[in-house]
């Protein structure tokens, strides 16, 4: 695929953005602040676009499992190549920014946060591919997925949608609300697991169907975990505060402890 038009362009073969190649012999710390801000804005736009792309892939993966749509599942698997390529582009474009000598705390947090969120999005896409591959491997079956599973899947897709929205809009309150759904998803997983065991014992579910169902459930649970990781990063980026997940729930955002 040729270079994309717009604000974010692919990197060159040696891992540097094309316009950076012409400046490699100049001290990066002499670059003006507005140059840093422009490149940071490009990076943010690319990350938000990647979030939208990953959300679409995850939604189509879940739909392929519900609908047993093999063509849709194949499209999810094929689309992962683009996500992987953009993942590398974003990471490589982040490195020169860290070398530009920017000292503003929020600007530095922005670059570090974008790198971390980019990694979370790539992992979510991989989990979406796992779900699509389960669909492709399932074949014809008469068993029906439990209603609780549908609720769980819709909840996780909603968490991903809100996570990407919180990132795009720098919305700390929305990010905090997403964190509150994590324990709910865990309860869904436990309920579905117990229900599947009972239905296998009664003969209502075949062993293979139950195994594949739990494979998808595990992938959804991990997607939810990555969503909370993204939201933790959004909170940290915008407030400089850190949240922790304890047995009794999420802590209130607090400044990091310095040794």
Image (cartoon, rainbow, N blue to C red):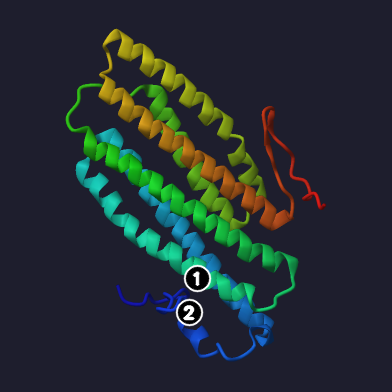
Q: Image height check: is 216 above or below 128? A: above
Pointer 1 local density, CA inside 10 Å: few below 14, some 14–19, many at least 20: some
Q: Earlier in the sequence, mark 2 or mark 1?
A: 2
Q: Position of residue 3 (x, y in %)?
A: 36, 77
Q: Position of residue 107 (x, y in %)?
A: 68, 68
Q: Image height check: is 95 above or below 209? A: below
Q: Nearer the viewer, residue 199 or 259?
A: 259
* Relative side of 139 to 5, left or right: left
Q: Quadrant of residue 182?
A: top right
Question: Can residue 107 be seen at all in this image of the molecule?
Answer: yes
Question: Can residue 64 be seen at all in this image of the molecule?
Answer: no
In this figure, which residue is indicated by the disc labeled 1?
A: 92
**Which residue ends up furthest to the right in the rendered image?**
259
Q: Quadrant of residue 154?
A: top left
Pointer 2 local density, CA inside 10 Å: few below 14, some 14–19, many at least 20: some
In this figure, which residue is indicated by the disc labeled 2?
A: 17
Q: Nearer the viewer, residue 33 or 101?
A: 101
Q: Quadrant of residue 218?
A: top left
**Which residue ends up furthest to the top in the rendered image?**
202
Q: Contact, CB < 8 Å: mark 2 with mark 1?
A: yes
What residue is rendered at 41% in x and 74% in y?
A: 10
Residue 122, disc = none
Q: Position of residue 131 (x, y in %)?
A: 34, 40
Q: Image height check: is 116 above or below 213? A: below
What residue is rendered at 38% in x and 59% in y?
A: 83
Which secondary structure, mark 1?
A: helix
């Amino acid at each position: 695929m040729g270079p994309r038009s717009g604000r974010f362009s692919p990197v060159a073969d040696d891992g540097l953005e094309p316009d950076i190649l012409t400046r490699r012999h100049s001290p990066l710390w002499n670059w003006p602040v507005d140059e840093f801000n422009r490149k940071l804005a490009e990076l943010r736009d690319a990350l938000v676009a990647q979030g939208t792309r990953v959300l679409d892939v995850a939604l189509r993966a879940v739909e392929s499992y519900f609908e047993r749509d093999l063509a849709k599942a194949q499209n999810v698997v094929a689309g992962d190549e683009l996500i992987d390529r953009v993942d590398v582009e974003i990471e490589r474009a982040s490195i020169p920014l860290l070398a530009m000598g920017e000292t503003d705390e929020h600007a530095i947090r922005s670059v570090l946060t974008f790198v971390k969120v980019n990694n979370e999005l790539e992992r979510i896409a991989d989990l979406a591919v796992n779900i699509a591959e389960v669909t492709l491997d399932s074949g014809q079956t008469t068993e029906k997925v439990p209603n609780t599973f549908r609720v769980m899947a819709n909840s996780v897709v909603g968490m991903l949608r809100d996570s990407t929205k919180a990132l795009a809009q720098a919305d700390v309150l929305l990010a905090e609300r997403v964190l509150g759904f994590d324990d709910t998803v865990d309860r869904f997983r436990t309920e579905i697991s117990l229900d599947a065991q009972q239905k296998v014992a009664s003969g209502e579910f075949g062993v293979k169907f139950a195994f594949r169902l739990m494979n998808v459930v595990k992938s959804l649970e991990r997607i939810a975990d990555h969503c909370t990781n993204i939201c933790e990063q959004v909170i940290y980026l915008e407030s400089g505060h850190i949240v922790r997940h304890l047995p009794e729930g999420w802590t209130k955002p607090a400044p990091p402890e310095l040794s």
